[in-house]
Image (cartoon, rainbow, N blue to C red):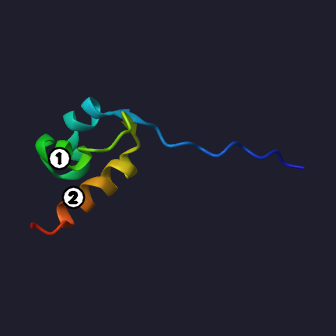
Amino acid sequence: MAEKKPAATAAKYGREELAASSAVLFGVPPEVLAGALHGVDKEELTVAEAKRFVNQFLDRKVK
């Protein structure tokens, strides 16, 4: 019987690392990432989590 391999977990990165690569990863400047993560309590996020926050931030309606 074949052994099950543990599920791969996504790597988590600090805010500074994500900001340094924001143009490549998300297509936005670091300032947009900072705005998207404002109010988020996590210090480390996966790229997918950060991308979700960026997309939500960009899709928000301006009041």
Element marked by disc 1 = helix
Question: Quadrant of the image for the C terminus?
Answer: bottom left
36 or 17: nearer the viewer: 36
Q: Which mark is residue 57?
A: 2
**Kind of residue at badge 1:** Gly
Q: Is residue 11 in view from this perspective?
A: yes
Where is residue 57 shown, x and y percent of the image?
Answer: 21, 58
**Kind of residue at badge 2:** Phe
Total numbered labels: 2
Circles 1 and 2: CB distance less than 8 Å?
yes
User: Which circle's residue, 1 or 2, is located before the other in the chain?
Assistant: 1
Q: Is residue 61 above or below residue 41?
A: below
Residue at the image position 36 percent from the left and 39 percent from the top: 41
Image quarter of residue 30: top left
Element marked by disc 2 = helix
Residue under label 1: 35
Residue at the image position 23 percent from the left and 44 percent from the top: 38
